[in-house]
Image (cartoon, rainbow, N blue to C red):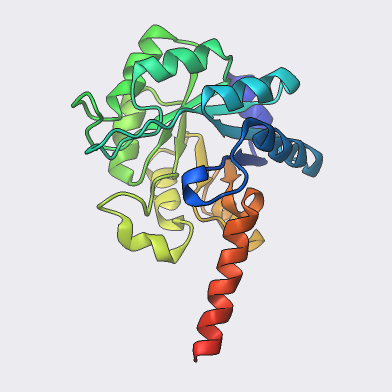
Amino acid sequence: MNSVLEKIRGHLIVSCQGNKDDGNPFYRPEDMLQMVDCAVVGGGVGIRVNTPPNIELVKSKYPDLPMVGIWKVVTPGCDVYITPTMKEVDRLVELGCEIIAVDGTCRKNCEGRYAYELIGEIKKKYPDQLVMADLATLHDAEMCMAQGADIISTTLSGYTEDTKDKYAKGVDLDVIKDIRAKFPNAFINAEGRIWTIDDARNAYQYGADVITVGTAITSPFAITRRFVNAINSFNQN
């Protein structure tokens, strides 16, 4: 477990995901594998991949590359969708994910339990499995640390009801700083709206142990749209 953490500490994890429903042309398993190829060539030390078919294909080519595995399952009327139950966890364990990321917020999952409670259940069933808690606030971090989370990740800051005001502000440096102050020995992953080199440097300066970047690296359509929106805004003025 510690060897995986030390391998990724101070480096970059690349989130290789695509959603057809968002209009992203890159969403097939072979597309995800090409994203991973680029991440590896570029020097990424780990990857974050969604759904078993994608994970299985990537693992077949890169069996020793640290994998943050997730399985997004959307349930109508429920906000928790990142690896929400033990059913998804069991499959990700079978696939050999070095790290499994789950929703670590104080929201209720589709089973009516607090999302962070799944962490304790995982650690009880799979004591040697590294678990990353995707969360939004310092309070979430407190709950997840108590459940035994190995990695605290800022993934959901700006995406929950109580943090949506932070979305437009970019990467949440304040929550990184607050978690580091509260838990000096926590292993912190900075993730979410890291768009620039300065964002990445700032995340480390504020206390992150590792950073994860997705859209800014692996989503050409979103990058294009961001430039187009900026240009349109300028032209309207």
Residue at 50%, 89% (x, y): give it.
236
**Is residue 201 in sight in this rendering?**
no
**Is residue 57 in sight in this rendering?**
yes
Residue at 51%, 34% (x, y): give it.
187
User: In the image as oriented, which residue stretches furthest toward the bottom?
Assistant: 237
* Front-most of residues 11 and 43: 43
In-image side of 71 versus 38 (left or right): left
* Front-most of residues 206 and 135: 135
Total numbered circles: 0
User: In the image as oriented, which residue stretches furthest toward the left?
Assistant: 112
* Front-most of residues 234 and 5: 234
Q: Position of residue 218 (x, y in %)?
A: 64, 48
Residue at 55%, 55% (x, y): give it.
194
Q: Is residue 53 above or below residue 213?
A: above
In-image side of 138 versus 91 (left or right): left
Residue at 39%, 7% (x, y): give it.
125
User: In the image as oriented, which residue stretches furthest toward the right?
Assistant: 41
Q: Position of residue 140 (x, y in %)?
A: 30, 39
Q: Position of residue 122 (x, y in %)?
A: 38, 15
Q: Is residue 15 above or below residue 204?
A: above
Q: For residue 133, what is the image quadrant?
A: top left
Q: Position of residue 7 (x, y in %)?
A: 68, 29
Quadrant for the N terminus in the image: top right
